[in-house]
Each structure stands twice: as structure tokens, then as C-alpha cells.
């Protein structure tokens, strides 16, 4: 019954903090959520276990904050024969010392201390112990609202004289007003509010591209994200009847394809050769291959494109684009073509 009440109380408090609109304007609250390693005193004969925890922190000023901490974990006895549910809640204070240090002034150490209870349910027995706790930690503010923390805290049982330890990491979400003084864990100057003159969401002390135009999408250091562009080219070379010689009038088309390949050095191109339906199919297959190879040779020998980037493929008469029953249609089908489309970032 008691554990149900504790869970409900903490959940209600955290939910209220998140959904109350006034919290951002009036209440300097920080919601803390994390995971820790609960190391039981050896005399408890309980295994260590991973422990999720939640907490709320209320800042009085830039140094002091009150906090409530709740953790709940399930573990086994050391002999593996039984289980125990450990619920703890702690009330206490945090003192943030000194000014920000490290990583552009975003890391701040703190001292935590307080008192509370540990409720251990063994299934057939339930014990409640009054505790004192103390620990050290540090918080790194990633943005104006979001932080990461690490902490080591010892809990001392006044009833059983056990010493349990909670080693934890957590996410910290500040619910107060980021436009003014933010309270504990921050200073009057920059605290949870960091200067961001260009409004791109990256603080000036981390912004490697200041002055970004409004609305520009940026990366983690404030620089514009690359804009994806598409470049494409289509080459078409037609041939005379039963010919695999590239006529001079198509040299510029081949040159443009070569320039495209030089611009995008990782691109591979397939040169596709085709014929009309005149003559035997096997001959047309060979003729289409010779036509494709003729264009490929121009790219390699005249324009210096690496042979590994160019592949000639003959398709014979299998892929007409016009009616082979007409003279004009057959002329269109006697062709070599290449189509490329490349996405690149500017």
C-alpha cells in the first residue's frame, strides 16, 4: 500500500510539472530522469541491480535547490532463492558550487544531501528504514533546457546501519523561464540561459557559424546543414546503318558526359548500345556492343576517364524506342545512350 502511494505521488508530481503551463513562467523546476546501479550493503545479502529513478528539483537561487528523489528496483537475494522489491524516496538539498567549468562553461559540480526512507518488500516481510544520504555529482547543460548529469550517492540506514550506494546518470529537463535568472545550477549571467544571437538554437559559445540567417537548418555546432541538389545528364549518339563509328557532330555530347564524370569523380556510367531490327539478332547484339564500346573508348582515350568507371553494354535490337517498320524509326533505334543522375550537397 505504501509503495503504491509513493509511486502515485511521484508520478502525479512529475506529470503536473510537465503539463502545467505556468511552470515555464513562474516555477524554477527541473525534471530529472535516469538509470543507476544500486549497490546494496553486503549485509543485506541482496544482489546489486539496475535502478530507474525520477526526481524533481526546485531552485531557490543560483546555488541552492530542494529535490525529491524516487527509485524502485527489483532484485534477488544472493542465494538466488528469493526476491526483494526496494523502493526509496529521499528529500534533500543540492548545492551548486563555484562557476561553470569545462566545455565552454557548461559543466557544474554539486553536493547533494538529505533524508528519506527505504522500503524493502521480501514478499513475506516488509521493512522500512529511515536514511540519511549524501553525494557528489555534476551537470552538463547541452541546451538551455536539456542537461546530462552523473552522480554518486550513499544512503545510510539509521535503523540497520547499512550503507547502500546509488551510481547514476540522468537527463535533466528545466521547466522554468529560460529568459531570466534560472536558479540553482546556473548563474545570473548565463545559467540555463545561453546567448544565441542568431537564434539557431546553438549557444554562441558553441556556435562555429555565427550569424546564420533565420530559419536555416543547422547542425550541432550551428553551421548550416548541406542542401541536397540533383545533377543529371543524358547523352544520345545515333549511328548510320551498320556503323559503329561515332560521327563528329556527337563529339560535344560525349565531351559533356566526360565533364560530368570529372565533376563527380565517384560516379560510374553504363554506356548502352542499341540497333534497329535489320539483320540477324546475333549480329545486332555484336553491333550494339561495338557501338557502346566506341563511345566508351572516346571517354577513356580522348577525355581521360578511368576505364573502371565506364562500362559498355550492348542490348542488340531488344529495346527499340521507335517503330522499326519506318526508316525514321530505325534511325532512332540505332543509338548509344547514357543517363546519369547524382545527388550532392552544396
Image (cartoon, rainbow, N blue to C red):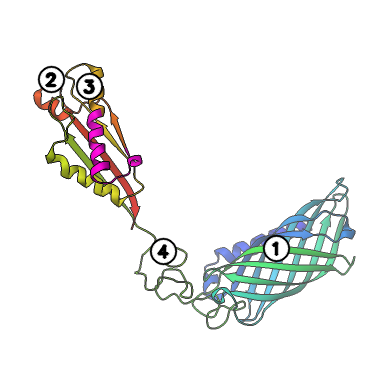
Mark 3 or 2: the one toward you: 3
Q: CA distance from mark 1 to mark 3?
A: 74 Å
Q: CA distance from mark 3 to mark 2?
A: 16 Å
Which residue corresponds to the image point at 25% horizontal and 38% vertical from the top-left?
297
Secondary structure, mark 1, is strand
Q: If you read the primary sequence from the N terminus, does the residue marked by circle 1 or circle 2 appear first? A: 1
Secondary structure, mark 2, is loop
Query: In this figure, which residue is indicated by the disc labeled 4?
Result: 218
Tell me the magenta residue range: 290-310
Say if mark 3 contacts mark 4, CB within 8 Å: no
Q: Badge 1 local density, few (<14 within 10 Å), some, or many (20+)? A: many
Query: In this figure, which residue is indicated by the disc labeled 3?
Result: 284
On screen, 284 above or below 83? above
Query: In this figure, which residue is indicated by the disc labeled 1?
Result: 168
Say if mark 1 contacts mark 3, CB within 8 Å: no
Q: Nearer the viewer, residue 227 or 161?
A: 227
Q: CA distance from mark 2 to mark 4?
A: 58 Å
Amino acid at each position: 500500500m505504501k509503495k503504491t502511494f509513493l509511486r502515485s505521488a511521484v508520478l502525479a508530481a512529475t506529470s503536473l510539472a510537465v503539463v502545467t503551463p505556468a511552470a515555464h513562467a513562474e516555477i524554477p523546476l527541473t525534471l530529472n530522469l535516469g538509470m543507476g546501479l544500486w549497490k546494496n550493503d553486503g549485509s543485506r545479502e541482496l544482489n546489486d541491480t539496475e535502478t530507474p529513478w525520477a526526481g524533481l528539483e526546485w531552485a531557490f537561487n543560483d546555488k541552492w535547490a530542494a529535490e525529491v528523489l524516487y527509485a524502485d528496483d527489483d532484485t534477488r537475494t544472493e542465494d538466488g532463492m528469493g526476491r526483494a522489491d526496494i523502493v526509496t524516496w529521499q528529500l534533500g538539498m543540492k548545492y551548486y558550487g563555484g562557476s561553470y567549468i569545462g566545455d565552454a562553461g557548461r559543466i557544474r559540480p554539486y553536493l547533494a544531501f538529505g533524508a528519506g526512507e527505504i522500503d524493502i518488500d521480501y514478499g513475506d516481510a516488509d521493512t522500512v528504514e529511515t536514511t540519511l544520504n549524501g553525494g557528489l555529482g555534476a551537470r552538463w547543460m547541452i541546451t538551455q533546457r536539456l542537461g546530462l548529469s552523473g552522480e554518486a550517492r550513499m544512503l545510510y540506514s539509521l535503523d540497520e546501519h547499512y550503507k547502500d550506494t546509488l551510481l547514476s546518470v540522468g537527463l535533466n529537463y528545466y521547466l522554468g523561464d529560460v529568459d531570466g535568472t534560472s536558479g540553482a545550477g546556473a548563474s545570473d549571467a548565463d545559467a540555463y540561459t545561453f546567448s544565441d544571437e542568431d537564434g539557431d538554437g546553438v549557444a554562441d559559445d558553441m556556435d562555429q557559424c555565427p550569424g546564420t540567417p533565420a530559419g536555416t537548418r543547422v547542425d550541432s555546432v550551428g553551421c548550416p546543414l548541406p542542401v541536397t541538389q540533383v545533377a543529371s545528364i543524358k547523352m544520345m549518339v545515333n549511328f548510320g546503318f551498320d556503323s559503329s563509328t561515332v560521327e563528329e557532330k556527337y563529339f560535344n555530347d560525349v565531351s559533356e558526359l566526360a565533364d560530368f564524370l570529372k565533376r563527380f569523380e565517384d560516379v560510374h556510367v553504363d554506356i548502352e548500345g542499341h540497333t534497329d531490327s535489320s539483320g540477324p539478332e546475333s549480329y545486332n547484339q555484336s553491333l550494339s556492343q561495338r557501338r557502346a564500346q566506341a563511345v566508351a573508348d572516346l571517354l577513356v582515350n580522348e577525355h581521360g576517364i578511368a576505364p573502371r568507371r565506364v562500362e559498355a553494354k550492348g542490348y542488340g535490337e531488344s529495346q527499340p524506342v521507335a517503330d522499326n517498320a519506318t526508316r525514321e524509326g530505325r534511325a532512332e533505334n540505332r543509338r548509344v545512350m547514357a543517363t546519369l543522375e547524382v545527388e550532392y550537397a552544396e
